[in-house]
Image: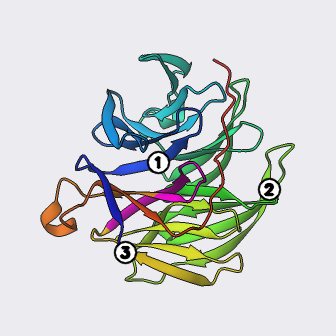
Amino acid sequence: MKPELIADYQCVCGENPLWHPIEKQLYWTDIPTGRMFRYDPATSEHEQFYQGQVVGGFTIQAEGTLLLFMARGAVKVWRNGELIDVLEEIPDERDSRFNDVIADPEGRVFCGTMPTKDRLGCLYQLHADGELIKLLDGIGISNGMGFTPDRKRMYYTDTSKRAIYVFDYDQNSGIIGNQNTFIVVPEGEGAPDGMTVDAEGYLWSARWGGSCLVRYSPDGSEERRIHFPVKKISSVTFGGKDYTDIYVTTAGGNNRREEGARAGALFRINLGIKGVPEFFSRISC
């Protein structure tokens, strides 16, 4: 199936597509330019609604507001056009920013940070009361995450290692452990970036530098590959009334001669495969 072009804002690094089940709209961000966008499939209208501090990733709160994960380890709620502080900064992350994030079934948020010139990145967990726990360090580029349908395991991507790992996950405590390698992308095929898990438990991984979206079975074998007319496929999510619309963000809009004529655009495909709603975050503010 040929991907359908939905919106083209020439994003430098379009990321974190996320379906808002209350508003029934698709949200995404362009990290380096500090822009955020939304698309309403009922009207086919889309708009830029935010320009400001860099947003590396975001979740949707249970009441429908956006929880933004930003530079310097800042976490803020976007409510009615205003930013409300949850965390002003993380001292260890003053020279970094958050990257991909995901809410878990209990409303906690797993949130990764980028490396700096002096150290590698980290994976944190933000609890409802604002407590922040460091789970992992030594991460090259913290990226896409997802949960198995039984909620007993969590996938986690380190793009620089071209690897997706799987951890045992305890829903009650939020603790992860027993790390194993799920897949490693071969040299020359790009690197795994954002991801999601569908209703059948298959993992969808965006391939940065690989011009494709790859679906993996729960045993790690490749089930299918969907090609796009751009090099840098950054992330993927399911949405729409029955969660069969697959939305895909891309990067490279500032260098289309090398990255592709539609680099930085948002695409959609529909294969009749169902996804599941992402979890709401439930962070107090």
Q: Which residue is mark 3?
A: 210
Q: Position of residue 62 (x, y in %)?
A: 66, 29
Q: Earlier in the sequence, mark 3 or mark 2?
A: 2
State left or right for residue 229 relative to residue 172. left
Nearest to N terminus: mark 1 or mark 2 = 1
Q: CA distance from mark 1 to mark 2?
A: 21 Å
- The answer to whether 153 is drawn above or below residue 182 in the figure is above
Q: Secondary structure at mark 1?
A: strand
Q: Which residue is mark 2?
A: 151
Near-viewer residue (248 or 274): 274
Asked whether disc 1 touches disc 3, contact meaning CB atoms under 8 Å apart, the reply is no
Asked whether residue 257 is drawn in magenta, I would say: no
Highlighted magenta segment, given as a residue range: 232-246
Kindly check if marks 3 and 2 are in contact, taking CB atoms under 8 A apart as contact.
no
Looking at the image, the residue that sits furthest to the front is 42
Look at the numbered disc 3 and give the secondary structure of its residue: loop
Q: Residue furthest right?
A: 172
In the depicted structure, whether residue 212 falls above or below residue 234: below
Q: What amino acid is found at the position of numbered circle 1 in the picture?
A: Asn
Q: Quadrant of the N terminus?
A: bottom left
Left or right position of 45 against 85: left
Residue type at the position of mark 2:
Arg
Residue 204 against residue 221 in the figure, above or below: above
* Residue drawn 54% across the image and 30% down it: 67
Q: Residue at x 55, y 78 (%)?
A: 184
* Amino acid identity at mark 3: Gly
| Residue picked out by circle 1 | 16
User: In this view of the protein, can residue 117 be seen by the observer?
Assistant: no
Secondary structure mostly seen in magenta is: strand
